Image: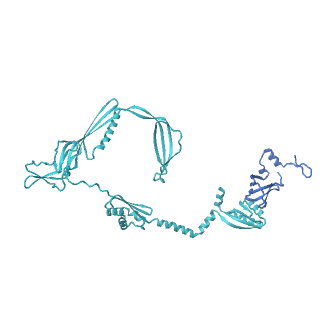
Amino acid sequence: MAKTAKNGHRRRKPCKTLLVNFFGLPGEVLLDLPRLVMLGNNRMVVENHRGLLEYTEETVRIKTAQNGEIRVTGKGLNLLYMAREELGLAGRFLRIDLPGGEG
Amino acid sequence: MYRWLLDFYHGYLVVMAQGKRLEALLNRAAAAGIYLWGIRRPAPGRLLFRVRGKDFPRLRPAFRRCGCRGKILHRSGLPFLLRRLLQNKGRWLGLAFFITAIQVLASFVWVVGVAVENGELPGEPRIREELREIGVRPGVSRGKIKKAHERILEELTIAFPEAAWIDVELRGVVVLVTMVGKTPPPAEEEGPGDIVAAKEGLVSEVIVLEGTPLVKAGDMVSRGDLLILGEKILPRREGGFISQPVRADGIVKARVWYEQKIEEPLVIWRPVRGPRERVVFSLRWRDRVFPFYRRDRISGMVLWERHTKRICRGRNQMNLVELIKDIYSEVSWMKVRVSPEEALAKARREAARELSFLLPEAAAVKNRREEWETGEDFLTYRLVVETLEDIAQLAVSTRERQEEPGEDRNRETAPEAGNGQASGI
């Protein structure tokens, strides 16, 4: 079902999204979408991030493109490594929220 | 593992950052392309992370802009280790001193070992004393011993004439002197004796050095015949003769014949290789052989050939490791007729080989005659060799033992009892 904007008009999908959907191209490349790889519930790799918003042992908030955010809640969270486009996270994950953002 | 090795090679720092905007610090570092790892929050407002040594200067603007303070807690990796080692001169001096000390100490002889084997040789203290006088003692440089090796051997040979073999071996810091004493041959029996014939032959020449000859040239003698009697006939002043027992000595040359008869078969069974063959490669290490595989056995008669190859010659001086190739071939036996020429050649070789064991070294071959006869299944070969050799052999006189002890060894012979010939036989 097509989404509706606040003013009542149907919101059109961006051209890039249509292109990706039509040709089956990788979204994380063309649309800057974050890519999450999880190994069980204690390891995670986030690609295409935009930096950290918060880092404690209980909560890690990662900024993604288009004002998106990934919120990981857990125990003993630990940042394994952090590079320009990729970061690794370890710990016991209890909850992962993906509020905001588009795509 | 690979990552750890790379980090160790490049060197890394463990850094503690303090401040309020630590997340911003991480973001700035990531944006600058600086790789951080092992990021932990030990306490609120504090951050621990690892960074490569060469990237740390690039982090300083980020620290400043985020209002954080950074402190290096630990330096790790090869560059820092090398720097520490190079800075510590005492350690290097100690290492150099240690190596030099080992080199210097290893250039001297510290132990002199003496091994005496066999024979009657003077005791070890006497040998050690002699070695000390020659200059072989603990504390002498190895080079000196190496240079004077020949001289030491010569001086030891002069000092110990009773030694049959002397060896001076330098094994690291040990000089091992090995001496083997002479084993004297069994003492010859003394006393009167006769010369008898050692072999059957035709006497051609008699040379008497001591005793009375009983044969002359042209006589045919058998083994054990008396040739020279161990008695001397001496004339007495008062008349008559005295028979005195002596040790007979002389040379009795005779023509001796040796005969060798060989029967060589003309029909033999010969192994013929079949089509099936199995090759097994093995590795020998000391006394143990490790085959590479053992499948596909060949049953029945098998011909086994072994080829060995020494591997790693440079490091394998004592032949500890060897590559072995065993070829097992299927064999079937076939009846083959040998040509008379081939059988004759084989019989000749066999006869010559067997005769070589019988002929004494000093014998001179005078004549050689051979004859053969070819039968249905065998070739009969006969070789006769004529030699000229000394057949004299000393035999202890039995007369001596029969005499009573204390009896006068000289016996008188009445002048009318004989004509000068020995009568005591």
Name the residue nearer the viewer: A13 or B365.
B365
Q: Residue furthest front?
A: B404
Residue B12, x across and y down, in percent: 67, 63
**Image check: B387 left or right of B69?**
left
Residue drawn at 53 percent across, 67 percent down: B96
Q: How is the image coloured?
A: by chain
Rendered colour, chain B: cyan
**Image check: B366 left or right of B97?**
left
Residue B351, x across and y down, in percent: 31, 39
Name the residue nearer the viewer: B261 or A8.
B261
Q: Above or below — where is B244 with respect to B305? A: below
Q: Above or below — where is A54 with respect to B386? A: below
Viewport quadrant of the N terminus of chain B: bottom right
Name the residue nearer the viewer: B203 or A4.
B203
Quarter residue B19 falls in: bottom right
Chain coloured blue in the rendered structure? A
**Image check: A21 left or right of B282?**
right
